[in-house]
Amino acid sequence: MKKIILILFFILPLTANAQLLDTGEDFLTDDWSEGLHIFVGIGLNTSTYRSNSRHNYLGWGSNFKTDVGWYFNHDWAIESSASVKFNKLNSDLIWDTLLTLGLRYRLEEYYFRAFAGAGVLVVVIGEDEPTARQDTARLHMDGPALGMGFGKTHRTEKGKVWFTEVNGTVQWIKHRDDVIVDGETPIAISSESVNDNSTIYSLQVSVGILLF
């Protein structure tokens, strides 16, 4: 699944310029133009980690997102999306990347999104944080993810389209690697399945623009 998402995420933008040249139709907030369009945005997220034995509130952090969508009529689109979230727990830096495929539906100037994919989470362990292995510098974890979103598009007097959006995601951790860093090269020193119902719940608020 992750390989498919990666392939689509990198292939779709390569054809976007050609599609842009083929259409002179404007993208309107209440009447989407067909073809490929890209939205990019930044915002804030609040996240929580839960497992059978732990409950950690990860606090507020920043997030960045890109949505590459194929708009096949004025109301529906399929899209490949990437979202990166940053949080901090004590002295640990948490870097969480979601790669997803989904559907987008328009209701006047509003829209709804539903998406599924995979998440890759990296925990950079702070110097004062204990670990099971003292030489571990990072934890790499991954698993499936689901999400839904609600947004609104706006159009300025000059014709620029921008958006505000709220997303909710659930990510299940199914695999974990303990990693050391040899120079600048990360090396996995152990790998294991995760079976303690580790789950990350996140709410993201984003604002951004339509690139084309």
Image: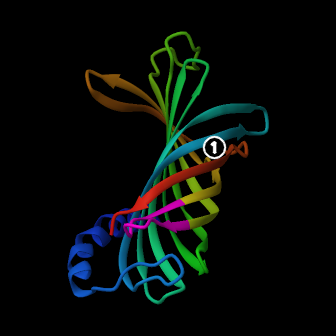
Q: Residues within 10 Å of mark 1 (few under 14, many from 20)?
A: some
Looking at this view, is 47 or 118 the one in front? 47
Q: Quadrant of residue 82?
A: bottom left
Mark 1 residue element: loop
Write down the residue under mark 1.
194
Question: Residue placed farthest to the front in the image?
Answer: 157
Quadrant placement of the C terminus: bottom left
On the image, the x and y values in percent for residue 74 come to 49, 87
**What is the three-letter code of the residue carrying label 1?**
Val
Q: Tell me which residue sits at (34%, 24%) in the image.
A: 181
Q: Is residue 66 visible to the viewer in this orientation of the structure?
A: no
Residue at horizontal 39 percent and vertical 86 percent from the top: 34
Is residue 114 in view from this perspective?
yes
Residue found at the very far right of the displayed protein? 52
**What x and y, as percent, mark residue 65?**
46, 53
What stretch of residues is rendered in magenta?
153-163
176 inside magenta stretch: no
Percent x, y of residue 26: 36, 81
Residue 159 lies, with reference to residue 41, above or below; the image says: below
Q: Nearer the viewer, residue 125 or 75?
A: 75
Q: Residue at x 27, y 86 (%)?
A: 23
